Amino acid sequence: MNIYTEIVAAKKKGQKLLAVLIDPEKMKIGEVHSFIKLVNASVATHIFVGGSTDVDHQIEHIVTEIKKYTILPVILFPGDFSQVTTKADGVLFLSLISGRNSEYLITQQIAAVPKLKKSSLEVIPTGYLLIDGGIETSVQRTSNTNPLPQKDLTQILHTALAGEYMGNKLIYLEAGSGANIPVSPAIINALSNELNDPLLVGGGIRTIGQLNQAYEAGADMVVIGTAFEQNTAFFNELKKEITNENIR
């Protein structure tokens, strides 16, 4: 399985992707099986696992349990180097390029290298941009960085392009877990028109309408976490209202 190649192929075909983000601090081992059954019955194409923190070091246990019940790619979305586990299929090798805190630009990445060198994880360099979602998010607090204002389209675009020029293979726009305001369609559209990299968008997307807006604006993959944590019935909405024909 080459996760990145498949994402690029989907982008070229115009196939829209959906990742379900599981936070290891919010998911109990005993809940994984029933939750993954819902994921498998939905149009989700990928599973991301990670969060800003993992105080109880549950990520390896959660990933191992997830892998028992799905054939979907399980990809790490680590908040720091301690969240790297060899039990997953791949890892988004994130660099928080919207901030200026060297800890999340390069220091955590260096700390992850010894474990990555010994693993078979597919490592996908990813430029990560934190966008203002209307609240202070856990990413903002943990990374001690400020999000980029949604009104500053030029700065967001230039930051994303700089990430692409530096060799990142994916660009991820993140409004943050529990954001009040998702990344605007105008921002998504502007970056989609300029970037060659696949564009991932997450944070604050809680409705079918917001999901479709992101796709229509040019997102290649939408990442949803909080909406599923708060309301697992959202899977049924996806199943009923979105078909493989219009996620294309």
Image (tube, rainbow, N blue to C red):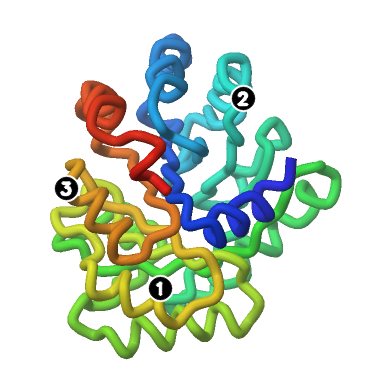
Is residue 174 visible to the viewer in this orientation of the structure?
yes
Q: Amino acid at mark 1?
A: Ser
Q: Which residue is mark 1?
A: 192
For label 3, the SS is helix
Dot 2 or dot 3: first in sequence order is: 2
Is residue 103 visible to the viewer in this orientation of the structure?
no
Q: Residue at x 50, y 37 (%)?
A: 45
Q: Residue at x 48, y 30 (%)?
A: 56
For label 2, the SS is loop
Check residue 71 in the rendering and tell me which mark sits there, or answer none.
2
Along the line of sight, the residue nearer the viewer: 175 or 58: 175
Along the line of sight, the residue nearer the viewer: 173 or 11: 11
Dot 1 or dot 3: first in sequence order is: 1
Dot 1 and dot 2 residues touching (CB under 8 Å)? no
Left or right? Give the position of 236 relative to 21: left
Dot 2 and dot 3 residues touching (CB under 8 Å)? no
Q: Measure how far apart labels 1 and 2 are at the Cα level.
A: 29 Å
Tell me residue 108's x, y (percent): 61, 61
